[in-house]
Amino acid sequence: MRTYHEGSNSLVDLSNVAYYFSVKGSSYGETNNVVNTASTIVRPEPMTINGGFKIITEGDDNKFPYQLRQLIDDNNLTEGILTRQRGLQYGQGLAMYNIKFEQGKRIVDWFWDDTIGKELELWDYPEYIINVLMDIIFKREYYTMMIANRGARIGRDAKAVGLKHMPLADCRREWPDDRGRINNVFVADWRNGDPEIMERYPMFDPLKGINQTTSIHYEALYQPGRSQVDFVRPGYHGARKWMQRSNVAPDILKSQTDNGLNIKWHIISPQSYWDAKRTILIENCKQLNQFYKEEMLEELKDKILTGLSKVLSGIENVGKFFHSEAVQVELGVGRAEVMKWELIAIDMKVKDFTEAQIQISKRADSAITSGAGLAPSLANIIVDGKLASGSEKLYDYKLFIATETPVIGMKALKALNMWKRMRFPNIPGEFGLYHDIVKREEDLASAQRTTNNES
């Protein structure tokens, strides 16, 4: 407690701390590593694991994918943005296409080959594509297992019969050899440091083509200023501090409610009032042949102030009032003071504080969507109190399809297209992700409009 004095008179006692915010505890230990910005630029060092192999680490502690997952789990927005972006990238799913030019215009001819389609149906290719898209959006990289048949085991040529998505958090690349080649990929649970159980697969070699045993293909988006021994960071990595600020805003508001001083009234009582009460108590004790204790006055204070608090609080007490008398006390020649009770309303500025936190949260939402490469209209983010109009969403969608999907689609389907060339070298065409051309409602015939289409 801190007591303020004026001369010899004690005016008011206040707590040293008005607010105490306990926002996050030790559970944020891992995520904080993601937030730190390196003060110096150094070349990464390999990590030696069981068997004497050296790997390229994911961050200083080799846990960056798990930390990134934790950061997203604690945010109310990022997971939805990534999922929405994956859906926009996937479109209507896998198709094949040929490219031709007519009168100087590039024409994409979409089609489907039943022979390849029957082969794809032998393994869950839609699930594979969906998972690869999530990894490349989540962290700009992915791992694919190229599953070979048993030909290599019996002395015949191997053949890539299918693809399998490998969770990127479980995969680590071997440190490059003297010629800069990465020869192996290690699969394990890396959350406990150096795992005892792991699997080693050779890195897929495009030059060897189809004649390989089961191997893993690694694909990543190029990042300027980083080499193959640097771990890949997502596009929203620069917005990570905004993500955390967005995360803690609800906790700050909760702490304000739970731990705030929440005082509405400041009651100032004259010392002379309590001196008079003390005198009365002393006289009563004398009449009752009792010994006066100062605790008697404190109990009287509690009783009077408790009754006053009931008058000042609650809807049921509207219309009630508190009465006191003012007494003028002469302090000396030309000096006098009015001894009276004062009830002063305290404005805790809760509204201003709350609105400030909401504005910070809105700014964080905008930073997160921008970092994730998605327009707020496509993420259903409210900007300035309103959602984007249908025409704004349509424009942003067409811009997204024209600028964002080609590169991501090419990278996400690179392993699948290599599989197609190895398995069906004589069938022309490439795999791509097909997207219907969305039109405005007013450009459609009445029967084709959403409002008139029950299906």
Image (cartoon, helix red, strand yellow):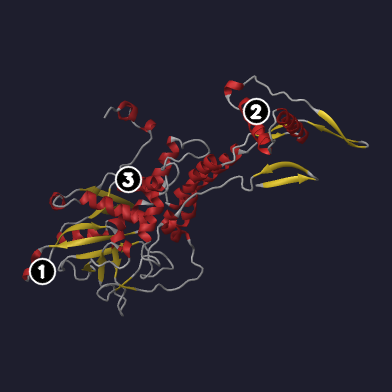
The part of the image, by quadrant, that contains residue 310 is top right
Q: Is residue 68 left or right of residue 120?
A: right
Amino acid on which the number 3 mark rests in the picture: Gly
Task: Kindly identify which residue carries mark 1.
Answer: 152
Task: Kindly identify which residue carries mark 3.
Answer: 87
Question: Does residue 346 appear in the picture of this structure?
Answer: no
How far apart marks 2 and 3 lie (CA) works out to 61 Å
Which of pointers 2 and 3 lies earlier in the amino acid sequence? 3
Task: Kindly identify which residue carries mark 2.
Answer: 308
Element type where label 1 sits in the image: helix
* Front residue of this view, candidates 264 and 111: 264
The residue lying furthest to the bottom in this view is 178
Q: Position of residue 160 (x, y in %)?
A: 15, 62
Which of pointers 1 and 3 lies earlier in the amino acid sequence? 3
Q: Is residue 219 above or below residue 361?
A: below
Q: Position of residue 319 (x, y in %)?
A: 64, 19
Which residue is found at the position 40% from the left and 39% from the top?
Answer: 394
Which residue is found at the position 20% from the left and 58% from the top?
Answer: 163
Q: Position of residue 289 (x, y in %)?
A: 70, 31
Q: Is residue 361 left or right of residue 291?
A: left
Element type where label 2 sits in the image: helix
